[in-house]
Amino acid sequence: MKKMHHLQIEPGQIGEFVIMPGDPGRCHLIAEHFENPQLIAQSREYITYTGKYKGLRVSVTSTGMGCPSAAIALEELIMSGAKHLARLGTTGALQKKINLGDIIIPTSAVRLEGTSVEYIPIEFPAVADIDIVDALIKAARGKNQKSHIGIIMSHDAFYKGSVFTDPDFLKREQVWIDSNVLSVENESSALFTIGYLRKVKVGTILTVVANHLTRKVITDEEKINPIFHRMTDICLEAFKNMEKE
Amino acid sequence: MEQVQYHIRCKKDEVNKAVLLPGDIERANYIGTKFFHDSVKIVDNREFHIYNGSYENKPVAVCSTGIGCMSAAVAIEELTNIGCKYFIRVGTCGSLSSQINPGDIIIATGAVRGDGASKEYVPIEYPAVADYRTVTALRNRAKKENTDYSLGIIRTHDAFYMESPFAFGDYKKRVAIWAEAGVLAIENESSTLFVIGSLRKVQVGAILVVAGNLITGKKGTKDELQKSIDKAITIAAGALVDL
């Protein structure tokens, strides 16, 4: 079998269930939850581990930041046999009631990025797979984890829309705040769009590391890591439940 | 909002909170008189015909929207103004998949925003997504009714005579991009209803019966379609009760 151009994995080397963090540095943390994790490949921003969770073959592959690299990761994972995929990442809240450390499970995403538009015209909705959304919500509830469920926004230019930007960024984001968009991140809309086009199930679970309205930020990785462990537990349990159905 | 709404001619709390939204006036009358108990027609103005009634002993309503997102937006805005919270569109559509035949049932998870009305509300990048709780309620009721359905994205648009079996010229070419994307079917109201639902924080879903197939040219007989429409109404009314 030929190796995938970027991920450097071969079909058969990954499970049908894959967790996709943005940061390659988080793959190891996520793989700690697998039984017998094997490092499969490491190339550019893409790191892949495969292992088992309660008997289910699972993998983790990082996507790097942004939709261009996330789209490559998703396409090559699908070509390698992935069927159920969950992005696991961080996000900046756009609503006052959403606190740092909260969990968001998006139903869909605003397509404010360039990648998905190369796939299909902009009027197409970037909708998460409802079976994955349901499974994530149920798994979170099963672990007594509250979550916000709704629409998020995905965009490309971090320094045009983050707490580290000029004070005018909220003006640009006001239309989304007013439209009840929960938060901002950089990958989900392309992942949801491509997932639908390729007929695989893609969802997302995010933790809030900044609030654009209060300007509060978590920068301490040690505060973020326990939340990533919890989100990994939720993801894996959701996968396990989907396997049963 | 004590004042009478401009088009639907009713006031706060005069319409039950859970509402079926057919396009066709006749279908609103059919649902109100044949499916609801103790039903009362409370509005008959333009394309908006409204009944209050009960289904499985719970208060429900039905309001026709007319064809297209323009009048559908008026209906859902004014119903929301007077306190309605749960909406399920029940209608017909044209299939874009050779696997989905006339009489088949579709539950929409989202809609392509090929309409004009929703663009006046929020930029086009914003997703027209069905409320996930309503989608789940519809799926659960379909299962209870032993009814197969297709689940996925549909396309909403404005110009019937550009994209339908009755359209001018090569309509198959115009819809090919959506068919290839796995869009299940075409209809005329859901995208705006979904967008307004997200903006105004009310729950909106849609269940559709395939009237014809744009790819294969197959059409259903009137009797076949009526059977499926009855099924879709039963599923939708049941889902409203569960929400």
Image (spheres, coloured by chain):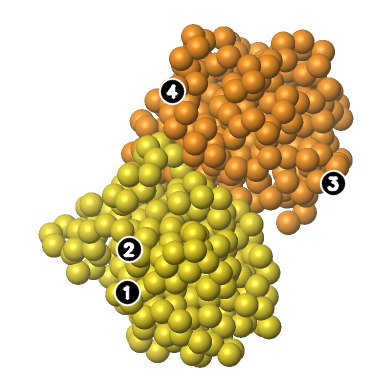
Chain colours: A orange, B yellow
Q: Is residue B67 above or below residue A148?
A: below
* Relative horizontal placement of residue B167, taking residue B82 as reference (left or right): left
Indicate the amino acid at tag 1: Glu
Marks 2/3 in contact by CB < 8 Å: the verdict is no
Q: Is residue B239 visible?
A: yes
Disc 3 marks which residue?
A142
Q: Chain of mark 2?
A: B
Q: Secondary structure at mark 2?
A: helix
Residue A243, percent across and down? Answer: 74, 49
CA distance separating discs 4 and 2: 31 Å
Q: Are marks 4 and 1 on the same chain?
A: no
CA distance separating discs 2 and 3: 42 Å
Taking the spot 44% from the left edge, 32% from the top edge, the residue there is A175
Near-viewer residue (B230 or A183): A183
Disc 1 marks which residue?
B47
CA distance separating discs 2 and 1: 8 Å
Q: Secondary structure at mark 1?
A: loop
Marks 4/1 in contact by CB < 8 Å: the verdict is no
Q: Is residue B142 above or below residue A182?
A: below
| First-in-chain label (3 vs 4) | 3
Disc 2 marks which residue?
B71
Disc 4 marks which residue?
A172
Q: Chain of mark 3?
A: A
Badge nearest the viewer, 3 or 4: 4
Indicate the amino acid at tag 3: Gly
Marks 3/4 in contact by CB < 8 Å: the verdict is no
Identify the image quadrant of residue B42. bottom left
